[in-house]
Amino acid sequence: MESVGTKSLSDAGSTARRLRKSRRIVVKIGSALLTDMASGVLRAEWLGALIDDVAELRKGGADVVLVSSGAIALGRGILGLRGKVLRLEESQAAAAAGQVHLAHAYQAALAARGIACAQILLTLEDTEQRRRYLNARNTFNTLLKLGAVPVVNENDTVATSEIRYGDNDRLAARVAQMISADCMVLLSDIDGLYTADPGIDASAQHLAEVPVINADIEAMAGGSGSAVGTGGMITKLAAARIATGAGCAMAIANGRILHPLNALLDGARCTWFLAHGSPAAARKQWIAGVLEPAGRLLLDSGAVTALLSGKSLLPAGVREVTGEFSRGDAVIILAPDANEIGRGLCAYGAEEARQIAGHKSGEIERLLGYRGRTEMIHRDDLVLTGRDRQVWPVQM
């Protein structure tokens, strides 16, 4: 197995350590785990056990976000649509009916354990368009700061085939990328990746660790029927590519048992896909080298000093705004001598940025007519770059 860059033997201690040390965790729950697929009824006992696990992770200091399927499965039963292939409009109707019950089930289970619940419905566009991405990221961060558990699902009632993920594996990975999670767990009907389909090949070996997703690993995924859920193992590998590239380790684990997350904490067998760097480093590199800047901000010397010490960019330190850009677009940050010192995602569009440039944050509401963000560019959305476009170290 070493020839394809994997470890075949499970390390229970390693599994437990990875999950325990994670500070921000995304957990994806599939329809077949949450609902009885034959009757369309919610598996309340299983959900309660899962939320007990979530409460334990939170007691350990971790933020937890749940990405949950199940709305269409529940809606089928509610609307009498079981046992048939659904047309698009029927799927959307089932999602609308089922989402109400799904959200209530999570709210009730979390409230019983003294935890606030928040519902977030996303489409592909929400994670691909920078302005909507920034809005969603800010919402997630605020909810987590306030101690809530966001429960995420694709907004199937409005999304069409052209703007859908189509599966919550990849949606979960995009959410992990968005919130800079350091761990993602895909709860599945199988305890990880095997060298072949274990249901038909008795010689198939379980892989405990996958450092790199290469052609050999992709070949092991087989077709879309190699695991239950939309797309099967292929979509899980696609999710792993997104997550690990964003600095987030990902596990595929057995979710059919009660307390599946606690089982991982006890060292249950799973497959770990190893992260490439840290979430913060991946995000900084994305801002520095991937996004095309749409404008420029010229700073005063005081603002430059503040940025070099690891602080956010406030409007008061901006002397001039050039270019046309929208909220969430990337901009180049210039020192007083007009040399580039950084890049970041601006919290204001160009016209608003011009209005508040040079003013104190306390004046934003008077100048714009609404209370916006205190920072022009938050430190989490900013990277310092040298003239060689390499990331500078920032004191934190």
Image (cartoon, rainbow, N blue to C red):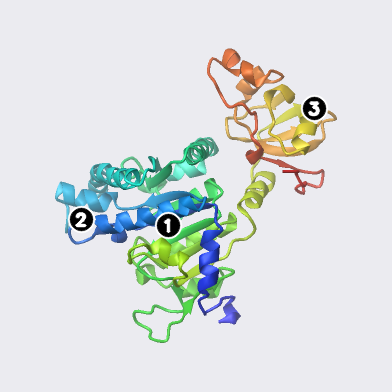
Circle 3: residue type: Gly
Q: Secondary structure at mark 1?
A: helix
**Residue 283: % across, % down:** 62, 48
Task: Report if residue 174 is visible in the image.
Answer: no
Q: Which residue matches tag 2? A: 40
**Residue 50: % across, % down:** 36, 57
Q: CA distance from mark 1 to mark 2?
A: 21 Å
Q: Earlier in the sequence, mark 1 or mark 2?
A: 2
Q: Quadrant of residue 247?
A: bottom right
Left or right of 283 on screen, residue 341: right
Q: Which residue matches tag 3? A: 302
Circle 1: residue type: Asp
Q: Which residue matches tag 1? A: 169
Q: Is residue 106 above or below residue 363?
A: below
**Residue 341: % across, % down:** 78, 38
Residue occupying image coordinates x 29% and y 61%: 32
Q: CA distance from mark 3 to mark 1?
A: 45 Å
